[in-house]
Image: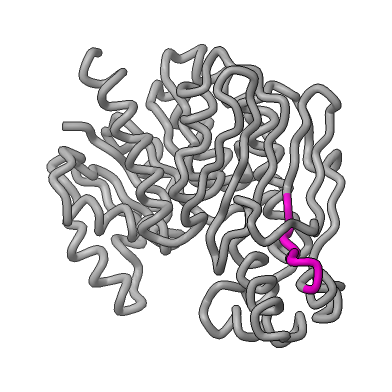
Amino acid sequence: MIRIAILGFGSVGRGIARAILAKNLDILVTGLADSRSGIIDPVGVDLEAALARKEEGAPCGSTDIRPTDVVTRADYDVMVEVTPTNVENGGPALHHIQTALRRKKHVVTSNKGPIALAYPELLAIAEENGVTLRYEATVCGAIPLIHAMQEGLAGNTISRLYGVFNGTCNYILTRMAAEGLTYAQALAEARELGYAEADPTYDVEGIDAAIKLVILANTVLHMQTTLDRVERTGIALLTPEALQLAEEQECTIRLIGEIIPKAGVLRVSPRILTKTHPLVVEGTLNAVTVETDLAGDLTFIGKGAGSTETASAVIGDILYIRDRYVQSS
């Protein structure tokens, strides 16, 4: 049995809770917090009751317990940090993660902000305190890309990786190509279906994809880069005519993020690809091709976002820690 505290009870946090309830994973939740409240229970939080309260629009727990109380007072093996991403300064997740690591607690996070902004510092704190930091869910949702690159491809030299890192943009471009919709029409449709936020800037300007490139560059490829070094062009200026021209050449357009480690290249931009290219996936899917010297070219395809899909990556990290660190400690 591994004990966890969950910080953040939005879509991802609730997805984790539902998975724990549905499957016999030997995971005990001893702490839980949303932005307004918290629960600390060493015997185990009643997840069904907490989910029911959130469905009613109420706080998940007691408003006398703050998220920081759960981080500092709850008894857990792993803190699961799944609060909303803040790429300006990483807060409040950055502080939560620093505090948990200094308490000698393992950390699993889906939060891109702290990993993109402060990975070297967080890794140093984790090593100093003999614990581990896992962050599979920060890039491409359900696709186990980071694990595959760090462990499955250990010993390989990665010469290039490129792919579709943002499902919102991919949906918009898919619909523009398939139905001849304008960018504005496809964006409106994406909003109606819940694929795009009210303010879509983070997705359509390529910021989300760029952050994911920075995470991969720093954590897997050891490039020590920052977000402002990513060349970035979004999709807002693309027209149906541009997609039609590509169509006439048996091609289409996708927003592609690319890293070429040896050249120090990180860029996000719309690219013309042949329709048979492995990165031409439909709807909200993500797809990433990794070019290596020993394994050749490998392409990973899957759902890059979603409550259950992101929960899959988080739970994979929790069980990785359980099997390698907690049970043997």
Where does the image place residue 137, in percent across and percent down from the top left?
Answer: 48, 44
Q: Residue furthest front?
A: 249
Q: Quadrant of residue 156?
A: top right
Q: Quadrant of residue 274?
A: bottom right
Q: Which residues are magenta?
A: 248-256
Magenta region includes residue 315: no
Residue 64 visible to the viewer: no
Give the colour scheme of this rendering: one colour
Q: Main secondary structure of the magenta part?
A: strand
Q: Confirm whether residue 112 shows in the render.
A: yes
Q: Is residue 300 above or below residue 16?
A: above
Along the horizontal axis of the image, is 179 left or right of 310?
right
Q: Quadrant of the N terminus?
A: top left
Nearer the observer, 160 or 100: 160
Residue 75: x %, y % from top left:
26, 33
Closer to the camera in the image, 135 or 128: 135
Across and down, in percent, residue 222 comes to 69, 21
- Side (left or right) of 315 relative to 3: right
**Closest to the observer, 251 or 167:** 251
Q: Give me the residue at 33% from left, 60% from top.
A: 14
Q: Quadrant of residue 4?
A: top left
Q: Quadrant of the C terminus?
A: top left
Horizontal and vertical percent position of residue 72:
39, 36
